[in-house]
Image (cartoon, rainbow, N blue to C red):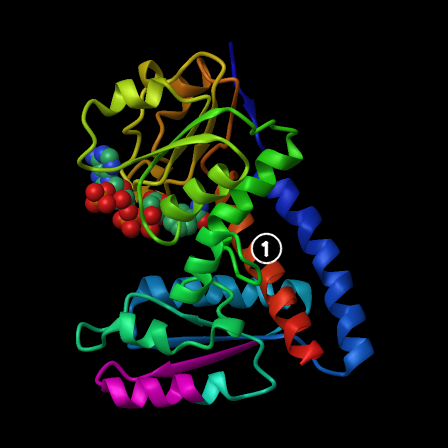
């Protein structure tokens, strides 16, 4: 068997063109361009690279990108003041706080201060709680939202499926587990303390990996015909690697997301989808 590969690149391009049309319509109708602000502190290269990728995505759909970059020696109060400025700026519809922040900044305090109606990354506890309780409105973190969209487009039937999610971060694993639960999967959320992880993984009709350990998941962890979602993105000397041994897993799985070209390209377009929702909310107010 060789798994059907779910093409996140092509799907993300299709969604991007749909969003571009919608953004243009709304801007023409209301005379305001949807705007995503990012707040970054210091000169971390990963955060800077992520900011450039978000800027490209914004430009691609016709949204404004507003970067606010503070010096690395900024104190908590000045970062909070910059965030307050964005929270209160009616021309800003979405805000992302880019990590990593300097050690001197408490990111939890900042996230708590973020206006939940502009939290397009779904990191504020109000959005996380509303997602958990299925009480809209809320923003779903872009990465798991993109994966679910890929599975839905592929016609996956979720109801009653045994799903195993490996990794319990607030931004990928935990919300992915909730999204699967809300679609009536029976969900196991595994992590670094899970006993006999290969045996747990082998139970899965839908196996999702959000760990960040390249090629940790081998062919003998996979139930034949399973659907595998690989969120892992680790840059190695051999290039970009997912959490799965791609060739081995593809030989056993029925369907899987490749790395690269799977969940990665979907993330930023789903962020734009969230910006569109934030903008719609802002226009209604
Ligand atoms: P994270 O916050 O570091 O969380 C990693 C999770 O993996 C933790 O829950 C950890 O368990 C678990 N884990 C670590 N080692 C393990 C092991 N040996 N066995 C089982 N579980 C283990 O990472 P993240 O932010 O969720 O990101 C995960 C991966 O997704 C990374 O490669 C990241 O680059 C990628 N990612 C991709 C996208 C995308 O667009 N595709 C977006 C975001 C992240 P504990 O909780 O017990 O420590």
Q: Residue furthest top?
A: 1
Say left or right for 239 vs 116: left
Q: Image check: 204 left or right of 272?
A: left
Which residue is at the front of the view, 284 or 272? Answer: 284
Task: From the top left corner, tell me how far across and down residue 283 is, in percent.
Answer: 70, 78
Q: Does the magenta stretch include residue 241?
A: no
Q: Mark 1 points at which residue?
A: 269
At 43% from the left and 66% from the top, the residue drawn is 126
Q: Which of 61 and 207 is in front in this view?
A: 207
Residue at 53%, 48% (x, y): give it. 145
Q: Does the magenta stretch include residue 67?
A: yes
Residue at image point 52% right, 33% down: 184
> Which quadrant of the structure image shows residue 196?
top left
- Total count of labels: 1
Closest to the observer: 56 or 1? 1
x and y, in percent, of residue 226 in the image: 47, 19
Residue 135 position in % (x across, y down): 54, 57
SS class, disc 1:
helix
Residue 7 seen anywhere in this rendered image of the structure? no
In-image side of 212 versus 4 (left or right): left
Q: Where does the C terminus fall, quadrant-wise?
A: bottom right
Residue 99 is at least partly visible in this image: yes
Q: In which quarter of the image is ligand 1?
A: top left
Q: Residue at x 66, y 48 (%)?
A: 13
**Magenta extent:** 65-84
Classify 201 as above or below 29: above
Rendered view: 149 above or below 5:
below
Tell me if mark 1 has few (under 14), some (14-19) or many (20+) residues whose alpha carbon lies within 10 angstroms of its own. Answer: many
Image position, residue 63 (x, y; %)? 64, 71
């Amino acid at each position: 068997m060789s798994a059907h590969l779910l093409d996140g690149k092509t799907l993300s391009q299709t969604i991007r063109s749909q969003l571009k049309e919608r953004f243009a319509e709304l801007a023409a109708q209301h005379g305001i361009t949807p705007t995503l602000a990012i707040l970054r502190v210091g000169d971390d290269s990963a955060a800077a690279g992520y900011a450039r990728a978000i800027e490209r995505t914004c430009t691609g759909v016709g949204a404004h990108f507003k970067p606010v970059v503070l010096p690395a020696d900024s104190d908590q109060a000045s970062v909070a003041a910059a965030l307050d400025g964005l929270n209160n700026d009616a021309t800003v519809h979405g805000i992302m706080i880019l990590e990593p922040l300097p050690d001197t900044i408490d990111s939890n305090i900042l996230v708590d201060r973020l206006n939940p109606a502009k939290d397009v990354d779904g990191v504020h506890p109000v959005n996380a709680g509303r997602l958990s309780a299925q009480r809209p409105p809320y923003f779903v973190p872009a990465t798991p939202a993109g994966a679910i969209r890929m599975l839905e487009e592929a016609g996956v039937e979720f109801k009653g499926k045994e799903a195993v999610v490996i990794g319990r971060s607030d931004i990928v694993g935990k919300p992915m587990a909730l999204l699967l639960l809300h679609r009536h999967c029976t969900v196991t959320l595994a992590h670094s303390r899970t006993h006999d992880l290969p045996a747990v993984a082998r139970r899965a009709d839908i196996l999702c990996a959000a760990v960040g350990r390249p090629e940790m998941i081998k062919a003998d962890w996979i139930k034949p015909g399973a659907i595998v979602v690989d969120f892992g993105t680790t840059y190695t000397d051999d290039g970009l690697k997912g959490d799965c041994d791609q060739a081995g897993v593809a030989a056993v799985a029925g369907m899987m997301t490749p790395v690269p070209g799977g969940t990665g390209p979907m993330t930023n377009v789903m962020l734009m989808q969230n910006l569109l929702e934030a903008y719609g909310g802002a226009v209604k107010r």
